[in-house]
Amino acid sequence: MSEPDSSFDDLVVDPSILPGVWTNETRVRIGRHEFTIDFVRRVPDDPRRFLVARAVMSAAVAFDLRDQLDDAWRRYADWSMPKDVNDG
């Protein structure tokens, strides 16, 4: 389950996208002025892949996304990994 995050409280969300989409593969392409991230769903026993979302962003936004993912990964690791016996 996701942790509550008040940083999203000020977002206006179209109800049709509120549930989000499940992705189990990503593809990143770069252009001269932008990054494109495709979010893909692979289904067992189906050779096709389904594009479920695409985000196109400037290099500055991609840089910010990288920083946010790094921070989220660190917090996830701290939260989900077993505590070392020596940690108290």
Image (cartoon, rainbow, N blue to C red):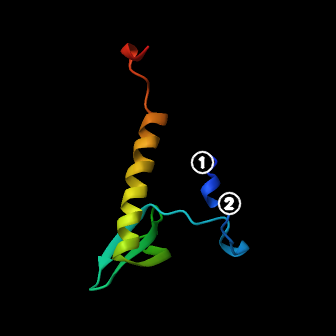
Q: Secondary structure at mark 1?
A: loop
* Residue 63 located left or right of residue 81: left
Q: Nearer the viewer, residue 78 or 45?
A: 78
**Residue at image point 45% right, 49% down:** 72
Can you name the residue that lies furthest to the right here? 15
Nearer the camera: disc 2 or disc 1: 2
Q: Where residue 53 sits in the image (x, y, percent)?
A: 50, 75
Q: Is 74 drawn above or below residue 19 in the view shown?
A: above
**Disc nearer the start of the sequence (2/1):** 1
Task: Specify the quadrant that holds the C terminus.
Answer: top left
Residue contact at pointers 2 and 1, CB within 8 angstroms? no
Residue to which mark 2 is pinned: 9
For badge 1, the amino acid type reads Ser
Q: Where residue 87 sits in the image (x, y, percent)?
A: 40, 17
**Residue at image point 60% right, 48% down:** 2
Residue to which mark 1 is pinned: 2
* Residue 5 located left or right of residue 61: right
For badge 2, the amino acid type reads Asp
Can you name the residue that lies furthest to the bottom here? 32
Q: Quadrant of residue 26?
A: bottom left
Count the marks: 2
User: Dot 2, how many residues are within 10 Å of its Cα: few (below 14), some (14-19), or many (20+)?
Assistant: few
Q: Where residue 4 sits in the image (x, y, percent)?
A: 64, 48
* Residue 60 located left or right of residue 75: left
Q: Quadrant of residue 75?
A: top left
**Residue at image point 68% right, 60% down:** 9
